[in-house]
Amino acid sequence: MLNKYDVIMIGCGHNALIAAAYLTQAGRSVLMLEKNDRPGGFLRTEELTLPSFKHDVYAAAHPLFL
């Protein structure tokens, strides 16, 4: 059976997640596709060095958008 969606979004960054939330509130069906293992795009926090010590992984990229 083929599913039909009103909107298909490629990439699940924070802006796409917010847009999808608004679209679903408006009654649209949304399919989101992401190549990474979790959504969020450039907003990601991970324990890289020590347990319970969290890093903003892509924080250095924020000045690129200014």
Image (cartoon, rainbow, N blue to C red):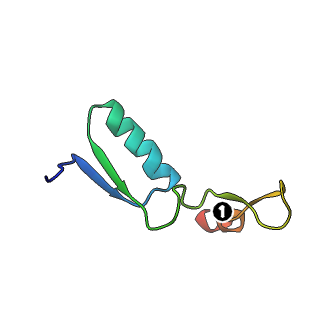
**Nearer to me, 53 or 20:** 53
Residue 30 left/right relative to 4? right
Check the picture and name the quadrant holding the C terminus.
Answer: bottom right
SS assignment at label 1: helix
The kind of residue on which mark 1 rests is His
Name, please, the residue furthest toward the front. 1
Q: Is residue 21 above or below residue 7?
A: above
Apparent side of residue 10 relative to residue 44 in the rendered image (left or right):
left
Q: Name the residue under label 1.
A: 62
- Residue positioned 21% across, 48% down in the render: 5
User: What is the crowding at mark 1: few (fewer than 14 residues within 10 Å), some, or many (at least 20)?
Assistant: few
Residue drawn at 71 percent across, 67 percent down = 60
Q: How many marks?
A: 1
Q: Percent position (x, y) of residue 37? A: 52, 63
Residue at the spot 46% in from the left edge and 47% down from the top edge: 17
- Residue 26, compared with residue 42, is above or below; it is above
**Nearest the camera: 3 or 9?**
3
**Relative side of 30 to 56, left or right:** left
Does residue 9 sit above or below 57 in this rendering? above
- Residue toward you, 51 or 6: 51
Residue 52 locus on image (x, y percent): 83, 53
Q: Residue at x 28, y 54 (%)?
A: 8
